[in-house]
Amino acid sequence: MNTFSRHRIRPQLTSVSIWTLAVLVACLGAYALWEYLLPRAPHVANALAGGLLAAGATALGTVPVMFSQTLSDKVQDTMFGFGAGVMLAACAFSLVAPGLEAAGQLGHGPWGSGFIVGGAILLGAAVLLTMDRLLPHEHFIKGKEGIEVHRLRRTWLFVFAIALHNLPEGLAIGVGYVGNDPVQGSALATGIAIQDVPEGLVVALALLSAGYSRAFSVALGMLSGLVEPLGAVVGALVVGWSAELLPWGLGFAAGAMLFVISHEIIPESHRKGHEVFATGGLMIGFVLMMLLDTALG
């Protein structure tokens, strides 16, 4: 091995070691937090477990990139559509419907419940839109967005973009455990985890195609899922604080997810001319999540 190769490989190995250590520390911290919360706040502990399930599914999806870097655009767009379908069904059956029911149980009539959940949906979308406009980030296809994007390294721009995508999923898991019984909450977390497997694969492949090393692409793709348990805990803590916040929290999470679906996932899946495959993936994902929610609920 020549000197140039050794110098090129060492930084990659060092980077992988740092990311691996970060993952181990995060896992140990999550386990300690779960042990602490389980007897004191079971719904928060369940939300943490659901978020970790989704993060693990994201990490699992990145593994094939270590062995192969080929995945056709058609397959990627089908995966994008599948993820959008799962998230759409999760919004409808696991967030909006329970939100309307929760508002009704608080004494609001049909119109009042509709306005509360509808307002929360719009608020969730508005918050994500504001973050999208202000937070510097870079999409894999659309390019750079947000303010002062040139002052940050490109890696961090990708990190922020992935975080913007995954945060609503984590929030949905957290408020899902508060707004539903544990079985329905687990159905929501399972559905999101299922769509996180191809999502993790697509993220790692996109990083690889952007010029990053294979090891770094896999490591960053794995770490991207850690936003979800964090969002799940925050969502469960905030919404679990007061019953009055439950319909607002469910609607807010639904609005945030709907924004990501419409603003990011569907446009990405249609950008390369594979609309039929993306739509087919969306339909399958929607039906799968609907079956999970209704069968387990």
Image (cartoon, rainbow, N blue to C red):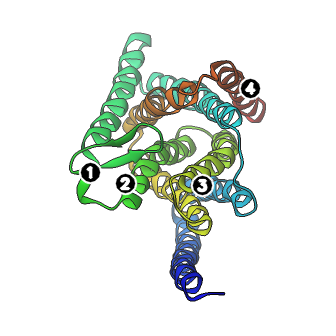
Q: The C terminus is located in which quarter?
A: top right
Image marks 3 and 1: residues in contact by CB distance under 8 Å: no
Label 3 secondary element? helix
Residue denoted by label 1: 149
Q: Amino acid at mark 3?
A: Ala
Dividing the picture into quadrants, the one containing residue 71 is top right
Name the residue: 52% across, 71% down. 33
Task: Determine which of the numbered discs, if any, sits on residue 204 in the image.
Answer: 3
Marks 4/3: CA distance?
23 Å
Q: CA distance from mark 1 to mark 2?
A: 7 Å
Quadrant containing the N terminus in the rendered view: bottom right
Query: Do residues under tags 1 and 2 come within 8 Å of each other at their CB atoms?
Result: yes
User: Residue 55, percent across and down?
Assistant: 60, 57
Closer-to-camera residue (123/60): 60
Hey, which quadrant is residue 145 in on the image? top left
- Residue at (49%, 22%) from the top-left corner? 100
- Nearer the camera: disc 4 or disc 1: 1
Q: Amino acid at mark 2?
A: Leu
Distance from Cα at disc 2 to Cα at disc 4: 32 Å
Residue 273: % across, % down: 60, 22
* Drawn side of residue 77 relative to residue 234, left or right: right
Q: Are marks 3 and 2 in contact (CB under 8 Å)?
A: no
Tag 1 secondary structure: helix
Q: Amino acid at mark 1?
A: Val
Residue that label 4 marks = 284
Q: CA distance from mark 3 to mark 1?
A: 22 Å
The answer to which of marks 3 and 2 sits earlier in the sequence is 2
